[in-house]
Structures are given as structure tokens and as C-alpha cells.
Image (cartoon, grey):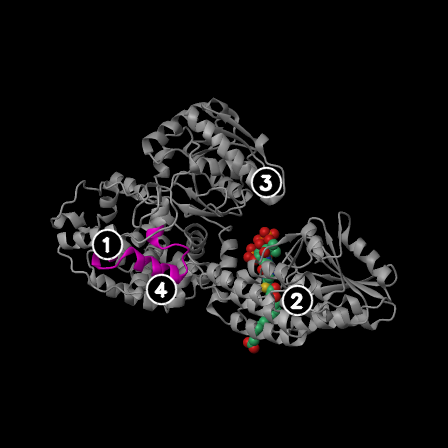
């Protein structure tokens, strides 16, 4: 909807009304067309201001309409009518002008933005391109390189940057609509020829062809199979090389393809999934809308290794006072230096002052006495964590929340060592903790609703997407990683190489294949966990027991590399070799290939040909199967939780929507059939045995992913 009011006798103010972000739904588009007709036809209206209700100009096209039969006036002719009209139109941009919202503003003759407004064309994140003239008007206004950067990254700019780039004409700290009305009064009756961006020639800096070739190369490399960024470059190339009308035609053709693509569906699903995880619930009945968080002003981080340092920075950048504790003096000094460097770099990037003053450092626990919340981030050792929880329970205020950054240890066991177990939750960060967007908030059976709500909100304050998950070994992310890694090891035993497995996964869209990733994070991490689980048997035994544990197939390959000191990048060798310890460039390692051959010979294994499809099915379907088990067990409330965790924490390609969404695009019955096939071939691998929930979903006709929550709820009551 849109409202028309006449202001100062001659300015027609058209206000978009569609809370919360004034998205351009069919009703809003109808409203704009009708109100603009009125403004352009009524003689007393000399100029027009377009603004949005509640301090938000417009969040763009209504994404909820995309999956449906689209009705209502299309955006392109609507914006064209505004631009070609005889009366000046001023966009009063408060809050946000995004996607179609910014394109609407670019169709206006003048743009005024409030200093706190953010502008951008984020369509690429939805698998689309700005198809209401954005790819054609923006480069004409601000030049090809700047437009290309904004459109291919979907980055939002501040009003100040928008002014610098020439996207807006003025920035105000005052009332934006009043300023726009003032401008509208001053330009009434003036010629608009020089104000219609579609009439501008597209700037043609020298070397444009070369520029586009390089841009296309870079985009293809970083897109990892995503189509939209590539289409954005193609549309901009059309803007630079063709007249406006032909460029618009190209924009439309490219959009038609993207709009109907599976990638757009996946990315739009992911957009809503990120919001759905905020509406969390637990099996015991705690919910996002009934559990009240407690304010946290002062927090402590105990343990300043890599994770603790990142968490300290994230808390300080979120405006909290932080007590950073490290009992080893040397480590404390190093951490202090490292944290200062991280704060400085972060502040530079965000154009703010570094938050040094927010952090105090201590080599003992006493200064945590008055904090509201502690995050323990020491070494992954239950005994050590237990002793810290006992000390914290003595020192802290009785109502201090005690959180642990464990990546998989039992939260409930830790809680049993705290004075108030209901105040204990897991806050599982991902490295680097000040950068990565994901936070798993792990509730135990005794965690209070308030403790969960507080940790969830604190995550959001740190600019993270918080996902509430239940307590089990590895929680959601690391639990699903186990069968994935296991399959990768088995494939090596059967004849694959790390290169082949990684290539299949990287072509699928992962930033790194499983072996490269393992080299980066350190093979010793998994080794320690397997040792704690009693799975590691020292020495290279060759009998039948060497490849079996507790009656199931087991691959000791990772253990054998660790025994040889091959921990990955940090030691200069792992599944690959590196120039030096700490080296980053993975090279094929003839030693490793020889080792695998010898290993197969020792164990009587005949190498066979493994193809990329088998790698994907074995690794990914095993991971997905574990995801279904997690849903069945109630560890994650819905498929969106798992998908958000995998995309934001584990490098799952975003344009494939996350593992559970991906399963629906493959077809649940196909996933089931292939799992059954692989399980028949490997009956001693429980990870390949299709779980009950998957079977039930298939038997129920494979319902769409958004209806699984209801299905699982009903199904759980019978489990
Ligand atoms: C706006 C935000 C920055 C706000 O953030 P904030 O944190 O404050 O709040 P939330 O993110 O939690 O959002 C609150 C609430 O609002 C919902 N929402 C947000 N934005 C939209 C939106 N654009 N549409 C619908 N709903 C929206 C959000 O989901 C929350 O509700 P929920 O119930 O889920 O909790 C932030 O929200 C944000 O960044 N939003 C996204 C902004 C964005 O991406 N905008 C671009 C949209 S796409 C677009 O504009 C496309 C244009 O270029 C125009 C294209 C025109 C052509 C379209 C049709 C072409 C058809 C072609 C083919 C057909 C041919 C044929 O078949 O014949």
C-alpha cells in the first residue's frame, strides 16, 4: 500500500506502507502506481517525494512473492514512469534502500539519504540480479567498477559512502522527509533532462574489455559455481557496451534464467532459514517468544588461545566490558598483543575507534567476580573445564551465566560441576571467532530458558546468527562431520586419493575439500577426540581388528598419519605436503600416495576406481543421514537450523541451501535409495544405514522442507 499526502501546498508525498521493511509487494506496487498517477495528473502537485513508513525507505521486492504466481504492476515500467514523468521526484531514504528499493530511488530524479541509512543491491545473495534497472542505472551513475563491486558482492554502503560514490545527492542528520520536501519545492518546474539516469551515457574508462575479462575471471573463481555473480557481470557488460534499452533487455533475459533456477530457490530458502532460527524452541518447551533474556553488560573470557582471543574481540566490538583471563603469563602477553591487533584491524575496516578500553586482562580468575556471564575457552579437556567451572562457581556472583566454548563435550556433565547448573549453556564459536557468523548455543537438560535466551541474544549482539541446539557428542555441526570424514577415509582405503575426494567436494562448491580442511584445522584435533573415545590403537597393526572397532568398520588412516607427526599445515605435512610448517599451499605428496598403497597392500585391500559421484553420495548423503537422525533425536528443531549451521560454519555452498535443503533438490527418495545401495555394499558402516525419519518422509510423499517441522513433531510423538 502507499499513502498520498499533499505537503506545503504543492509537494505530493507518497509513503510506502508495508511493515516491517516496506517491501514492494503487489499491493505496494499498486499503491505507488495509483499515487504517482494522482501526483502526476493533479495540477496543484508540482513535485513529489517518495518515502517509507516507520523510518525505512524500502527493503526491495517482496521475496515472499517470488515462489508464487506474481501479480500486480511490474517494477520496471513503474520505475520508468516515475523517471520519465514531467514532475521532479525526490527519494527520501531513511533506514534502508535495498534491491528494488534502491532501484526505485535510482528512478527518482533526486535522492536524499539520512546519515544512518544503508543502501545496496543485495540480489546476488538471493541468486538474482537487480532486475528493475539496477544493473543499467547504477553504472551510469557511479561508473562501471564501483557498480560492479557493489552488485557482485551485494555489499551495503553507508550514506556517507553513497554520497562519495555519487549515489545520493545529499545526506542529512535531520528529518529526511522534511529535507526532501524542501528540495522538492526548490526544483519544482526545473528541467529534468539532466536528472534521468537512463539518459546518461555509461562511462567508458580505457581498458574496459580487459577490466571485464579480469572481473569475470575473479567472479567465476570466487563464486564456486554460483550463477548470479556471473550474470551480474554479464549485465554490467551490457550496460557498458549497449544502449540503455538493449541493456534492459539483457538484464531481463539474465533475470529470467536466474529467477527460475534452483540456486535462487536455495538462496531464498536460506534467507528465510537464517531468520527462522531466531524463532527457536527446545523440547522442554522453552521458546524465543516466552523466554526473557537477562542483560549482559560485563563478560569474561577464560583461556586466551585462538578461540578465546577471537571471542574477546567479538564481545568488545559488541560494546561489552570484557575481563580476559589467561593464567600463563607469557600466553597472556601474547594474547594481549594479538587482541589489540585484531581490534585495530577490525576498527579500521569498520571506520570506528578500536575498543581497547573495553578489555581488562588478568592472570587469575578473581576479577571475574562481578561479571554477568563467563565464556570458558580453555583447552578441550573435560577435567580442566570441570576444575574451571568449580572455581567459577566459587568466585562469580550467584546469578552469573557460565558458558563453555566446547566443540563437543557434554554440557550436562560440565553443568553438574557448577553451583547453578541451570545457568550453564554451551556457546560454540567457530574460528576465527570474531569473524565467523555462526554460534551454536547448546542447551543441556538443565539449562534454564533464560540462560538459552541470553546466550542467543548475546550471539546476535556479536553480529552472529545464533542457532539453539541440544546436547549430544559434537552437537549438530561436528556430529554430522563425523560420518562425512569417516566416508572420506574409507574412500581412500578403497582406492581414492585426497586430491580426487577434495576435487569432487570443491567442484560441488565447498571452499575446501575434506582433506585440505583437515590439514588446515589440524589432524591432531580429531585424533584427540578419537583417543578420548577409546578408538585409537597405537601402532600399525594389520590384522582384521585393525580396521574395526566395536563391530563396525573403522579407518585408522588419520591416526597413522598423526603417529608420524603429520598434523597438517602446522607441521608442514598431513594429507598434502607444504613448503614449511605453517605453509598454506597444499601440494600433492608422493609419500602419501606410497603410504596409501602400502596400507592397502598390508590390509589386503584392492584399489578400485572411485568416481566423483560416489564421493559426493558417500560423503554428503552420510552427512545428510546424520542430519535426519539429529532431527529425529530433537537435537535440532528443524532443517533450517542444520542448514544454517552447515552454510555459516562448515563452508557448505550457500547456493545449495544447506544439506537438508539439498536433499530435497536431489529428491528424498533418491537419497534414500542411494544410501540403501551403499549400505548394502558396506553393511558394517552404520552411518550409511538410512534413518527412520528419512524413510518416514519418503513414505509420506517427501513433503517440502518447510513442512518438516510439523511432520517431525507429529512423528516424534510416535517415536
Ligand atoms: C531489510 C533488512 C536489512 C532488515 O533487517 P532486520 O535485521 O531489521 O530484520 P530482518 O532481516 O529480521 O527482517 C524483518 C522481517 O522482514 C522480512 N523481510 C526483509 N526483507 C524482505 C523482503 N525484501 N521481502 C520480504 N520480506 C522481507 C524478513 O524475512 C523478516 O521477516 P520474518 O518473518 O522472516 O522474520 C533485511 O531484512 C534484509 O537484508 N532484507 C533483504 C533485502 C533484500 O535482499 N532485498 C532485495 C530483494 S530482491 C529485489 O529487490 C529484486 C529487484 O531487483 C527487483 C526485481 C524485479 C523483478 C522481479 C520479478 C522478475 C520475474 C522474472 C521472471 C519471470 C518470467 C516469467 O516467468 O514469465
Q: Residue 229, image x and y in percent?
A: 53, 64
Using residue 317 as the reference point, say whether residue 698 is left or right of it. Answer: left
Magenta stretch: includes residue 62? no
Which mark's residue is nearer the viewer, 4 or 3?
3
Question: Distance from label 1 to label 2 (Cα)?
Answer: 52 Å
Q: In the image, which disc is placed on residue 697? A: 4
Which residue range is magenta in the image? 491-516
Above or below: residue 661 compared with residue 282: below
Which mark's residue is nearer the viewer, 1 or 2?
2
Q: Quadrant of ligand 1?
A: bottom right
Mark 1, residue position: 593
Q: In the image, which disc is placed on residue 204? A: 2
Question: Distance from label 2 to label 4 (Cα)?
Answer: 56 Å
Q: Earlier in the sequence, mark 1 or mark 3?
A: 3
Work out whether residue 667 can be spotted.
yes
**Circle 1: element type:** helix
Which mark's residue is nearer the viewer, 4 or 1?
1
Question: Distance from label 4 to label 1 (Cα)?
Answer: 42 Å
On the image, which quarter does residue 384 sit in?
top left
Q: Earlier in the sequence, mark 4 or mark 3?
A: 3
Q: Earlier in the sequence, mark 1 or mark 2?
A: 2
* 365 or 452, nearer to the observer: 365
Residue visible at 87% across and 71% down in the picture: 43
Using residue 120 as the reference point, say whether residue 671 is left or right of it. Answer: left
Q: In the image, which disc is placed on residue 347? A: 3
Quarter holding the N terminus is bottom right
Amino acid at each position: 500500500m502507499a499513502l498520498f499526502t499533499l505537503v506545503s501546498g504543492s509537494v505530493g508525498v507518497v509513503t510506502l506502507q508495508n511493515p516491517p521493511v516496506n517491501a514492494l509487494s503487489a499491493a505496494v506496487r499498486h499503491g505507488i502506481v495509483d499515487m504517482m498517477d494522482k501526483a502526476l495528473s493533479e495540477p496543484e502537485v508540482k513535485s513529489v517525494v517518495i518515502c517509507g513508513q516507520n523510518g525505512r525507505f524500502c527493503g526491495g521486492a517482496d521475496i515472499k512473492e517470488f515462489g508464487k504466481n506474481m501479480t500486480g504492476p511490474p517494477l520496471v515500467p513503474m520505475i520508468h514512469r516515475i523517471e520519465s514523468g514531467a514532475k521532479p521526484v525526490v527519494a527520501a531514504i531513511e533506514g534502508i534502500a535495498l534491491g528494488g528499493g534502491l532501484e526505485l530511488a535510482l528512478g527518482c530524479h533526486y535522492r536524499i539519504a539520512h546519515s544512518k541509512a544503508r543502501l545496496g543491491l543485495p540480489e546476488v545473495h538471493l541468486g538474482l540480479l537487480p532486475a528493475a534497472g539496477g544493473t543499467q542505472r547504477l553504472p551510469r551513475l557511479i561508473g562501471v567498477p564501483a557498480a560492479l563491486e557493489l552488485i557482485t558482492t551485494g555489499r551495503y554502503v553507508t550514506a556517507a559512502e553513497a554520497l562519495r560514490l555519487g549515489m545520493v545527492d545529499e545526506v542529512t542528520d535531520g528529518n529526511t522527509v522534511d529535507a526532501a520536501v524542501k528540495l522538492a519545492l526548490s526544483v519544482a518546474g526545473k528541467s529534468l533532462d539532466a536528472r534521468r539516469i537512463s539518459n546518461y551515457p555509461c562511462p567508458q574508462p580505457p581498458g574496459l574489455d580487459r577490466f571485464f575479462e579480469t572481473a569475470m575471471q575473479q567472479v567465476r573463481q570466487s563464486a564456486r559455481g554460483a550463477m548470479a555473480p556471473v550474470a551480474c557481470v554479464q549485465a554490467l557488460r551490457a550496460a557498458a557496451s549497449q544502449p540503455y534499452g538493449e541493456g534492459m533487455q539483457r538484464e531481463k533475459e539474465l533475470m529470467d534464467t536466474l529467477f527460475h533456477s534452483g540456486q535462487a530457490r536455495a538462496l531464498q530458502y536460506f534467507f528465510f532459514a537464517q531468520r527462522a532460527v531466531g524463532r527457536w524452541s527446545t523440547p522442554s518447551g522453552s521458546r524465543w517468544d516466552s523466554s526473557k533474556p537477562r542483560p549482559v553488560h560485563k563478560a569474561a573470557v577464560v583461556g586466551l588461545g585462538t578461540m578465546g582471543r577471537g571471542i574477546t574481540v567479538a564481545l568488545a566490538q559488541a560494546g561489552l566490558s570484557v575481563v580476559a583471563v589467561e593464567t600463563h603469563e607469557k600466553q597472556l602477553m601474547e594474547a594481549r598483543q594479538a587482541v589489540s591487533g585484531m581490534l585495530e584491524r577490525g576498527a579500521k575496516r569498520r571506520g570506528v575507534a578500536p575498543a581497547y578500553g573495553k578489555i581488562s586482562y588478568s592472570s587469575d580468575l578473581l576479577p571475574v567476580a562481578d561479571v554477568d556471564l563467563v565464556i570458558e575457552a580453555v583447552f578441550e579437556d573435560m577435567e580442566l573445564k570441570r576444575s574451571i567451572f568449580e572455581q567459577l562457581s566459587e568466585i562469580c556472583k550467584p546469578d552469573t551465566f557460565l558458558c563453555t566454548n566446547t566443540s563437543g563435550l557434554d554440557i550436562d556433565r560440565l553443568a553438574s560441576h557448577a553451583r547453578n547448573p541451570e545457568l550453564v549453556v554451551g556457546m560454540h564459536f567457530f574460528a576465527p571467532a570474531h569473524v565467523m557468523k555462526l554460534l551454536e548455543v547448546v542447551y543441556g537438560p538443565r539449562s534454564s530458558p533464560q540462560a538459552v535466551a541470553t546466550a542467543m541474544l548475546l550471539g546476535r549482539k556479536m553480529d552472529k546468527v545464533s542457532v539453539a541446539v541440544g546436547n549430544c557428542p559434537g552437537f549438530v555441526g561436528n556430529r554430522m562431520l563425523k560420518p562425512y570424514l569417516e566416508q572420506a577415509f574409507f574412500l581412500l582405503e578403497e582406492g581414492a586419493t585426497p586430491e580426487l575426494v577434495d576435487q569432487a567436494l570443491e567442484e560441488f562448491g565447498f571452499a575446501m575439500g575434506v582433506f585440505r580442511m583437515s590439514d588446515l584445522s589440524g589432524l591432531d584435533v580429531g585424533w584427540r577426540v578419537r583417543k578420548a573415545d577409546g578408538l585409537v590403537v597405537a601402532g600399525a597393526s594389520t590384522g582384521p581388528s585393525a580396521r574395526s572397532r566395536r563391530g563396525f568398520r573403522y579407518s585408522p588412516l588419520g591416526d597413522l598419519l598423526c603417529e608420524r607427526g603429520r598434523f597438517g599445515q602446522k607441521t608442514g605435512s598431513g594429507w598434502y605436503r607444504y613448503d614449511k610448517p605453517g605453509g598454506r599451499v597444499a601440494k600433492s605428496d608422493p609419500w602419501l600416495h606410497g603410504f596409501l598403497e602400502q596400507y592397502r597392500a598390508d590390509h589386503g585391500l584392492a584399489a578400485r576406481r572411485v568416481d566423483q559421484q560416489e564421493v559426493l553420495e558417500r560423503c554428503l548423503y552420510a552427512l545428510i543421514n546424520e542430519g535426519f537422525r539429529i532431527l529425529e533425536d530433537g537435537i535440532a528443531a528443524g532443517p533450517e537450523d542444520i542448514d544454517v549451521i552447515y552454510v555459516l560454519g562448515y563452508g557448505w555452498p550457500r547456493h545449495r541451501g544447506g544439506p537438508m535443503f539439498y536433499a530435497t533438490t536431489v529428491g528424498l527418495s533418491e537419497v534414500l535409495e542411494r544410501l540403501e545401495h551403499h549400505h548394502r555394499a558396506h553393511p558394517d558402516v552404520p552411518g550409511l544405514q538410512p534413518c527412520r525419519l528419512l524413510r518416514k518422509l519418503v513414505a509420506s510423499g517427501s513433503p517440502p522442507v518447510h513442512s518438516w517441522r510439523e511432520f517431525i513433531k507429529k512423528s516424534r510423538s510416535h517415536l
